Every structure is written in structure tokens, then in C-alpha cells.
Image (cartoon, rainbow, N blue to C red):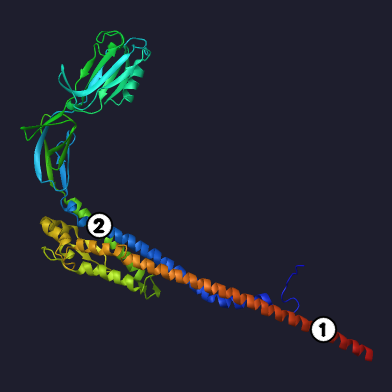
Amino acid sequence: MATISSPGIGSGLDVKSIVSQLVALEKQPLTKLKVQAATVNTKISAYGQIKSLVSTLSSAAGTLNSLTTWNAVSATSSNAKAVSASAIGGAAANSFSVQVTALAKAQSYASDTLPLPAGTPLGGGTVTIQLGKWTNPSTFAPSVGVAPVDVTVAATDSVTEIASKINSANAGVSATVLNDAAGERLLLRSKSTGEEFGFQLTVADDDTVNTDAAGLSRLVAGASTQYAANAAATINGSIPVTSATNTFANVISGVTLTVAELTTTAAEITISQDKSVITKAIDGFVAAYNAVNGILNEATKYDPATKSAGLLQGDATAIGLQSALRGILQSTTSGSAFARLADIGITQQLGGELAADSTKLNKALENLDAVKSLFRIDNGNPLTNGVALKFKTFSQGLLATDGFFQSKDASLKRSLDLNGKDQQRVGEKVNRVEAQLNRRYSALDVQLSSLNALNAYVTQQVAQWNRVKQ
């Protein structure tokens, strides 16, 4: 039969309280270990944030070390509405004029008015669409290697159903139906602009007459065509150029022209060095460095007034990283008219943050090659290479799979694993001690209860004897 245990009832001892207090003393190391584990987890998170910011710094340094940044150009047009321009990095500084004489067109085709009411079947047969080029309204040359597409038309098909079949046939044209007061028309349009992307529509009518105004032949009898055309322009007043689209991608090396309107006067196109890309890259580098510097300052600081320390205060690896980054900034570069960032207006402030003097920087950029060398020259010497190259190389080492951050993360996780095992051992010990204390104090409780009972019996007997004697 199960019994209800109530330690202390018979003896008067507060067994639960005594055991609880003794167990709490045994648990003190466990509390300390939990605090240590929380601190390690916080450090893992902090180093993860630092790693992310170093990765951003690495990208910013990589941008400054890239030729694409230093070769960036801009393209401007005196009439951007009619002729717009874009240029890829490395395109030579240049200027030229463009006059647009024709815009690219897709071929369009409209049948004559078809019989009313709308939806009336035209008759059965086959519609054939062949892609190719019209050299004049009567001469058509099929595209080499492109087979004609046949669309079978049932005798019950309306023009709308014919248009749907043409669209499903993937014949290089799009079809739709126009409804006006006179009736329906089949409209076709080539899917690409340019002379080489025209098409020819023919029919094979079930009535065997393919050109009359009866049956399926009504799609071609009396039809009108606007032929495809290339875009045309004149460069520098004397050089004619054409394109199948309204984009001229291969006329000027590295430059793409897009035309939208015919012009009576030429638009002036100017290709020039785009220094805004460089200043943006420098600003991005400064911001990325300051973000890393800021988090390291906060993590390693000590405030004597409040006697409070940052999470990584005294952490040799964090302090070493901070010193290494500042050391790169303070190193010099060989092979450039500018040896340090301060020479172009980028200086360290109190606390290590960078600040850029835009006036001095813009003045330095007048000597673009020297500024470029300051950032990206490769002397084969990590101590004298360009600033961006130094930071890129250093940060890549930090971020490598066997680099600083990976090693630090592994070290902290090992510490966390050991802490977990220590917590487990302490917990097991606490459980053993608690069990032992419960057994001992329960036994003492039983003994004291027996003694109390004996004492009560003796006291009762003495009182009885005294009454007898009286």
C-alpha cells in the first residue's frame, strides 16, 4: 500500500527547507556555468556581426580594387528623348553626332474587310506563313533555314479562331482581329523589327482558287501590307548605319545607342570618365571601415567612470583585429604620387573613424592615375601595395574557411560544449547530493520521531507514578 511521506511532522524538523538550502549551495557552480554559457553565446553572436561587417568591408575594398570602377564612363546626349546612349567601362572618351533618319519597324498585314456578321466562317483550307525579307513589294526571299508554317483551317472556323490557331503555331507573327463598322479584319504583325524579319502569307483554299474574294482566299485578296524596316542613322554627318532594332549596339565600340524619334538636327553624344562611380566606391569603403571600427570600439571599450566594460574588453583576438586594421590604414603605398589616404583627404579621427574631405578628394582625382595607384597598385609586397588591395587581401584571409573568424567561432563553440558537459556533471552531482540528503534527514526524522514518542511515554509514566504516590 502506498504511503504518504511528510518529513518533519513527527520530529519537528523542517527537513524540506534544510535539504533545499543545502542543495542550493551545491547548485551555485551550476549558476555560474550558465552565466558563462550565456556570455559565450553572446560572444559568438558578436563575432558573427563583426564577420558580416568585415565581409562588407571586403566587398567595398574589392570594388575599389576593380578596374571596372576606375574605367567607369558616362554617356550623355544633347537630345536624350530622341537618342539615348550608354557606355561600358573602358570605352574611350569621345564625342560624336547622331542623326536619326528612320526607326525600325515590324511588318504589319491587314486583310480586307471580311463578311458580316462577325464570326461568319470563311471556309476551309491552309494558311501558310513564311518568314523572310521583302526587297520590294513584289520580291520576297525566304529566310535561310526557316521552314514555312502551315495552319490548317476548318470550314467552320471564324476569323477569331483562325487568329488563335496562328498564334498557337509559333510562326513568328502575332495575330489579332479588328472589328470596325464595315466588319472584321485579320491583323498580323511580325514579332521582331527589321528588314530580315518580314513574312509572307499565302493560302491554299479548299475551293482551289487562292486569289479570289471567296472562301479562305479573302485573307489575301485586297490585303494591305506595311513592310518591315531597319532603323537608320548618320554618324558625324556622313557615315550611314542601320540596325534591325532601334538599338545600335556595335556602331561605336563600348557604346550602345537607342533611338526613339526621327531628328532634323543631329544629337551630340559625349562619352567621358565617370568620377562619380569612383567617389561612390570610396564613400562605400569609408562607411564599411567605420562600421567595423565602430563595433570593435564598442565591444572592447572600458568606461572608468561607470567601471563598465564592453563584451570583448581584454579579448586579445578582438584587440589584435582592431590593431591590424588600423595598421593597414597607417601603412604607406609605393608607386603613387600619394602615399597615404590622408594625402587625398581621407583621415582618421579620434577613435579611429575615417572622414573624407570632399574638396581635397576631388582635387586629388584630377590626378586620377595616382589615386588609382594609391588604392590598387600591386607591388608584390603586402606592405607597400595599394590600400584597397591590402584590405581585400587581409579581409579575404579573415573570412577564409580556415581563417580568423572560422577559428574563433570553433574555439567559442568548443568552450560552449565543454561548459555544457560541466553543467551536466554538476547537475548529476546535485541530484546525487539531494538524494543522499533526503535519505539522511529522513532517517534522522524517523529517529527523532521515535525519541519524541519515548519521551512522551516516559513523561506520562512519571506523571502516573506521582499520582499513585499521592
Which residue is found at the position 19% from the left and 54% from the top?
278
Question: Which percent across, then down, holds residue 425?
Answer: 53, 73
Side of 368 relative to 43 (left or right): left
Q: Position of residue 332 (x, y in %)?
A: 16, 68
Residue 112, by quadrant, is top left
- Secondary structure of the residue carrying numbered label 2: helix
Q: Amino acid at mark 2?
A: Ala
| First in sequence: mark 2 vs mark 1 | 2
Amino acid type, label 1: Ala
**Quarter of image, res 465:** bottom right
Q: Residues within 10 Å of mark 2 (few under 14, many from 20)?
A: many
Residue 39 showing in the rendered view: no
Horizontal placement of 156 versus 333: left or right? right
Residue 288: x %, y % from top left:
28, 59
Q: Which residue is mark 2?
A: 60
Q: Which residue is mark 1?
A: 456
The answer to whether 77 appears left or right of 294 in the picture is: left
Q: Say if 470 sits above or below 365 in the image.
A: below
Q: Is residue 71 above or below residue 401?
A: above
In the rendering, at what x and y percent does residue 467 appear?
Answer: 92, 88
On the rendered structure, is 5 left or right of 166? right
* Front residue of 446 and 9: 446
Label 1 element class: helix
> Front-most of 438 and 36?
438
